[in-house]
Image (cartoon, helix red, strand yellow):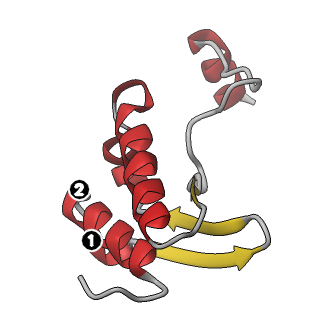
Amino acid sequence: MPKTDTADQEFLEYVIKALVDHPEDVKIDRKVDEMGVLLSLKVNPEDMGQIIGKAGSTARAIRSLVRIVGLKNHARVNLKIEEPEGARPTRGRKAPAVGEELEELKL
């Protein structure tokens, strides 16, 4: 890989497209500020599980690799994985119980 300003973005794109079932939906935005480089990743909602991995292990590994590429190029690189629209509830939001879902549908 040639050494460029966007080597981190190119590396991330290569790795993510190799992992997902919908590589055409992979979008990576790169922003640079005084804190370093922020790579924002968007993938098809069906591919989120493959990117996150069991207990977040794949996401942690990808973040580590991207940071190493950044260090090699003298930059602090962070990865933000964008949550797709309609994703499952996150911590703090209570998912309805099975019976509550049925009651909501009756309304």
Q: Which residue is mark 1?
A: 14
Whether residue 22 can be seen here: no
Tell me the quarter of the image containing the C terminus: top right
Q: Quadrant of residue 18?
A: bottom left
Q: Quadrant of residue 69?
A: bottom left
Residue 5 drawn above or below residue 85 = below
Q: In this orientation, which residue lies closer to the viewer: 20 or 100?
A: 20
Q: Which residue type carries mark 1?
A: Tyr
For residue 20, side relative to residue 52 (left or right): left
Classify 10 Å Cα crowding around label 2: few (below 14), some (14-19), many (20 and above). Answer: few
Mark 2 or mark 1, earlier in chain = 1
Secondary element under disc 2, as helix, strand or loop, is helix
Q: Which residue type carries mark 2?
A: Leu
Instruction: Name the residue: 27% across, 71% down.
Output: 14
Secondary element under disc 1, as helix, strand or loop, is helix
For residue 107, side relative to residue 69 (left or right): right
